Image (spheres, helix red, strand yellow):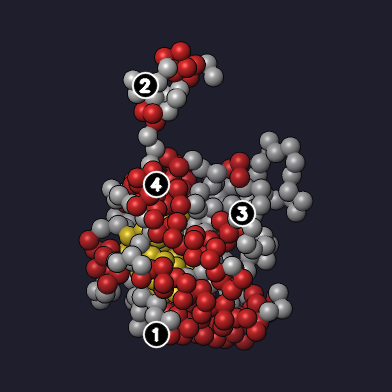
Amino acid sequence: MTQSNPLTQRLDAGPVICAEGFLFELEKRGYLSAGEFVPEVALEFPDALRALHVDFQRAGSDIVEAFTYNGHREKMRVIGKEDLLEPLNRSALQIARSVADAKPGNFMAGNISNSNIWDPENADRQAEVRSMFTEMVGWAVDEGADLIIGETFYFAGEAIAAAEIAKASGLPVVLTLAPMAFQEMADGVGIVETAQKLEQLGVDVVGLNCFRGPATMLPWLKEIRAAVSCHVGALPIPYRTTQDEPTFFNLSDPRAEVASPHGRTFPTALDPLQTNRYEIGAFAREAYDLGVNYIGVCCGATPMHIREVAEAVGLTTDASRFSENMKNHFMYGDNERLAENVVALGSTA
């Protein structure tokens, strides 16, 4: 077990909620481009990013995670904007810090993630990725991060590199894996074995995020929870993945009358394949009952999903004021003011 710190103290006491999935939500709101998925919003539309953080915060997220996912040097080179790398990171971190500071007890997290260039056979590429992580963690420390989140790693080697660099910061570390459809990490290492190695490196929370929905994430969570003694994290996507289609990369939609132009539902035609809020709540309760105290939702998350997670584990949030109240619905309710002839339409409408 890792040494106690503010994050693990909170987790020891009960659930901690973390919202992720900013890429999908901000793309839907019209602030970044699908495919590129670069968080330039932190520079171009900082008020939009701040508003999303606040919405997730009101919904119950205890962690304000700086939106630097894909904000690494290689991605900025791909779009020809490497000169914006540090300003983008610092802006995202400063926005997250200001939102976290507005609510006592919130944490601000720096973020590093899958580089998409890691190569188990290429030492030069590995060194390049380590360099990218090191500079991003350094900026997070400079801007007052309370912890470092490393997320969405599908290579075990890259996850381990991220953990080593994040731990060197001296801050608490959360490290979550994102296995693809093959039932191991992309470099052939076992998923549970990787989680155990991360715990041995001193990571405070190990677990899974992204790629998999509740149905295909939960079995692996059970195995990880049984194999490690540190805290475990669970942040699924809100999509109905199955044993045959275990990640959102391979989800099909045979009923779609108009297919996406790139031939796959991921990432822009997933809408009909979403879970409902009650399925996300059920996942959160089951994960919590397993002993998973670090819970959230990843790509596809909305504040509604985060509120559902928080309430499912017994928390009341600022947004709970507006939780479901069907007793006043014009067809489903039982308020004495409701017109009986209209309520009667509910069974036939």
Element type at mark 2: loop
Q: Which amino acid does label 3 sit on?
A: Lys
The residue that mark 4 highlights is 308
Among numbered discs 1 and 2, the one appearing first in the sequence? 1
Which image quadrant is residue 267 in? Answer: bottom right
The residue that mark 2 highlights is 337
Among numbered discs 1 and 4, the one appearing first in the sequence? 1
Element type at mark 1: loop
Depth check, mark 1 against mark 2: the one in front is 2
Task: Answer whether labels 1 and 3 touch (C-beta < 8 Å).
Answer: no
**In the foreground, 163 or 58:** 58
Q: What residue type is labelled 1?
A: Ala
Separation of residues labelled 1 and 2 (CA atoms): 63 Å
Among numbered discs 3 and 4, the one appearing first in the sequence? 3
Image location of residue 271, percent across then percent down = 61, 45
The dot on residue 168 is 1
Among numbered discs 1 and 3, the one appearing first in the sequence? 3
Task: Bin the neighbour count of mark 4 within 10 Å (Cα to Cα): few under 14, some 14-19, many 20 and up.
Answer: many
Element type at mark 3: helix
Q: Which amino acid does label 2 sit on?
A: Arg
Work out whether residue 202 can be spotted: yes
Q: Say above or below: 8 vs 223.
A: below
Separation of residues labelled 1 and 3 (CA atoms): 36 Å
Separation of residues labelled 3 and 2 (CA atoms): 38 Å
Image location of residue 258, percent across then percent down = 75, 41
Q: Number of numbered discs present?
A: 4
The residue that mark 3 highlights is 28
**In the foreground, 4 or 117:** 4
**Residue drawn at point x = 39 percent, y = 80 percent:** 144
Depth check, mark 3 against mark 4: the one in front is 3
